[in-house]
Amino acid sequence: MVRENSERDIRAKSVIISGLEETPSDDDASQVLDLLCSEFSFEPGWIQCRRVGRQIDGRPRLLRVSFKSSEDAARLVSEAPKLRRSHNHTVRSCVYINKNLSCHERTAAFDARRRKREKLRGGDSDGLSGSAGGLNPVRTNMERRFFVNSRRLIDTNHVAQVPDI
């Protein structure tokens, strides 16, 4: 429990920046500070940068940026949509700033975005096909998944029956 709380605090103080080019000098901190100052007029007192993941097909690795306070990280995430209006074409089209989420949180956020897209398209919102008496079986024997149904969160870790929406 204590480890989970400390991990949550660490994640709250950091963000993930994707699409920021890697430089041979590995001076990511100055590159991030330049981005923050030019795009947001935001200059945090202290940051720590670390590339995470493997480099694939010449794409830049993700960059985890840790701040001194969770307020700095939250402010940056809330102002991140301003990047889409940047004067720099590369920043406007390639650089994204997101919360530092755990694997389960990323999966839940992805599923929520997928359901929202499908709902906007008028498609099947739960992504399952077939019908068993008006109910769709949700099989989650391998991993925990969270599904939103009728505006309430249902935690399923076994085979459950969820009504069609």
Image (spheres, rainbow, N blue to C red):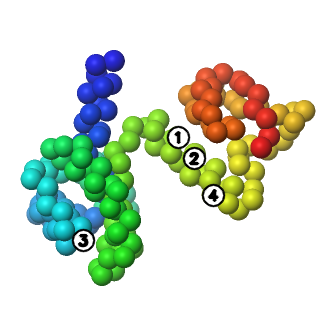
Q: Locate the C terminus by quadrant.
A: top right
Mark sitting earlier along the chain (3/2): 3
Please tell me which residue lies in front, 67 or 151. 151
Whole-angstrom CA distance, mark 1 to mark 4, is: 14 Å
Q: Which residue is mark 4?
A: 117
Q: Residue at x 57, y 47 (%)?
A: 112
Q: Nearer the viewer, residue 2 or 54?
A: 2
Label 1 near label 3: C-beta < 8 Å?
A: no
Amino acid type, mark 4: Arg
Numbered circle sitting on residue 108:
1
What residue did someone put label 3 on?
39
- Dots 1, 4 in contact, CB < 8 A: no
Q: Residues within 10 Å of mark 3 (few under 14, many from 20)?
A: some
Q: CA distance from mark 2 to mark 4?
A: 9 Å
> Which of the marked residues, 2 or 4, is nearer the chain's N terminus?
2
Q: Which residue is mark 2?
A: 112
Q: Position of residue 152 (x, y in %)?
A: 62, 34
Distance (Cα) linking label 4 and label 3: 29 Å
What kind of residue is marked 2? Answer: Ala
Residue at screen point 30% across, 49% down: 74
Distance CA(mark 3)–CA(mark 2) = 29 Å
